[in-house]
Image (tube, grey):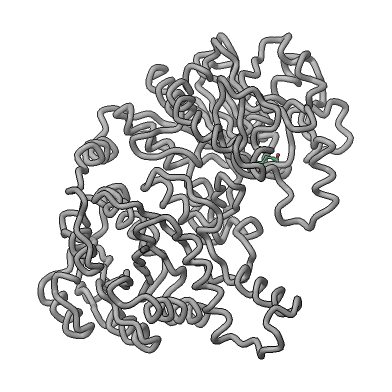
Amino acid sequence: MTKYIFVAGGVISGVGKGVTTASIAKLLQACGFKVTAIKIDPYLNYDAGTLRPTEHGEVWVTDDGGEIDQDLGNYERFLGIDLPKKNCLTSGQIYKTVIDRERKGEYLGETVQFIPHIPEEIKKRIIEASKGYEIAIIEIGGTIGDFENIPFLFAAKRLERDLGKENIIYVLVTYLPIPSHMGEMKTKPTQQAIRMLSESGIFPDFIVCRSKMHVDAVRKKKIETYANIKSEHVISEPDIDTIYRIPLDLAAEKLPEKILAELELEPKKSPDLSQWAELVDRVANPKKAVRVAMVGKYVATGDFSLSDSYISVNESLKHAGAALNCKVQIDWIDAKKLEDKANVAKMLKDFEGIIVPGGFGASGVEGKINAIQYAREHKVPYLGLCYGMQLAVIEFARNICGLAGANTTENEKDTPHPVIDMLESQREILKQSDFGGTMRLGAYVAALRKGTLIADLYKDRMKEDAPKIAALEKDPAQKFRIGKTPTDFAVIERHRHRYEVNPQYIEQIEAKGMLFSGHHVKLDGTKLMEFMELPGHPYFTGTQAHPEFKSGLGRPAPLFYGFVKACCESK
Ligand code: GLN
């Protein structure tokens, strides 16, 4: 039977509830349990695909094509497992299912109500996503006291009644501010969060206290008394240098053992985090450093965090850096500023590497293309992710193949040379559906070309992916992810895009020296370019995929590893 851990947040959002959830999951996994993690997002969007990136940061993509909140990214990065899209529940999905069912008459004339029908559907989905796991950890998005949280808390309570309290625990991740004019850590907001949670009949079994510094004994005592829990269940989680240290800190607080005891479980093994600790040490105290220019589209106003839009790329660079004992310092370069050619060398000359990450639309595109040209001509290591590969192909077509005005039809419908174009089959999908879910989404298999740089970088990953490809082959619903691609020398990466390298230009481009080192063959026989490299350049690679969705500490994504290594060498 599955045991459940619900994690809710108190006081304010953004204090690291997701990372705490991922860390707890990792620790329980290290104790020998089969653990999964589930995110509940209380918004009404059906999925994160249509959320405004400037408010919500990057969209995470799962193997099965889900467009999900980035917290799922933290779970995957920490747990090292591929989670399916059903592990992200939104209020939108819940309400839609209930209303659709009502319209089909499946409630047999019952009055369909907020309570109990909504929590019942939530409960059903949690149980479904937890099947096959010994422990499921469920993070409830938002903050206690939000109206939209209520049905989820209600569902947790129902599950507790069905399964018994020994099978469910609650963790409250709260925040203890230290107002600067007082210089004192305040527990009052946490007390209020505890009271609000209790209004749903839920009493936390553990309280994780996020704050600038350690929570002292006096304050721990206050919280302990107020929440009426054991003092060793009040856990201090102060700010630290890197999020990857959190599992180590929580392990030092013996949190996994305490949680297991509360769930009436014995650890199957004592967690060995020595390798993880070594990597964390390298993240915190690297031997060398390189500077990387991330040329992207940034919103200059407001106070949202710019770097959040590319969080997986940032983390992937950290993972590669940890493997190479190298700090990767990322500078955010607004592509618009590079549209003026006079700025390009000035702004890019101090970097060991250049990345153009994924993106959409025409804004800043010519600046990105200028940056790519600079990287190619000055032999600066370059990594192009999705849009970054498409634009590298455009740059090469214009400046090396002599295809003046080459472009993507995403930005210029009537370009004389549509080297990046939407393929007919994708156009069909777009015509049939609404705007949500019209992209090539999720894992696709790519056959690699032997003897290429890409094949060399992927040699270990290829072995890891072989059983995953075999599993796809057996699943009729997922077989399209292989299509007609040869699978004997192949890898899997995740996708999120509409446009592709136009097959009509491949011969012409390759004749001039750009090498497409991996491809996918669709069921209809269309050949899609998945990887690109430039022989003779120290490191110039691109992929139509998003390798940043499959990177973790201790298992860096091959293209990022190759990129950071080349940056180190170029220095
Ligand atoms: N805009 C491009 C496309 O839709 C690239 C998308 C991306 O970078 N994720 O194909």
Task: Answer with left or right where residue 79 lies relative to residue 487.
Answer: left
Left or right: residue 391 versus residue 144 is right
Q: Total of numbered circles in the picture? A: 0
Q: Position of residue 252 (x, y in %)?
A: 15, 55
Residue 3: image location, x then y, percent: 34, 65
Q: Is residue 567 above or below residue 335?
A: above
Q: Where's ligand 1: which quadrant?
A: top right
Residue 435 appears in the rendering = yes
Q: Give the answer, above or below, for where 357 lies relative to 140.
A: above
Image coordinates for residue 446, horizontal then vertical, percent? 61, 27
Question: Which quarter of the figure is the N terminus placed in?
Answer: bottom left
Query: Looking at the rendering, which quadrant does residue 182 occupy?
Result: bottom left
Percent of width and height locating residue 218: 11, 77
Q: Residue at x 79, y 20 (%)?
A: 505
Residue 209 versus residue 176: which sits nearer the camera? 209
Q: Residue at x 53, y 51 (%)?
A: 84
Q: Residue at x 71, y 13 (%)?
A: 510
On screen, residue 552 above or below 433: above
Report which quarter residue 262 is drawn in: bottom left
* Residue 174 visible: no
The residue drawn where x is 40% and y is 33% is 556
| Relative depth, front residue between 64 and 300 | 64
In the displayed structure, 485 sits above or below 205; it is: above
Horizontally, is 501 left or right of 145 in the view?
right
Q: Quadrant of the C terminus?
A: top left
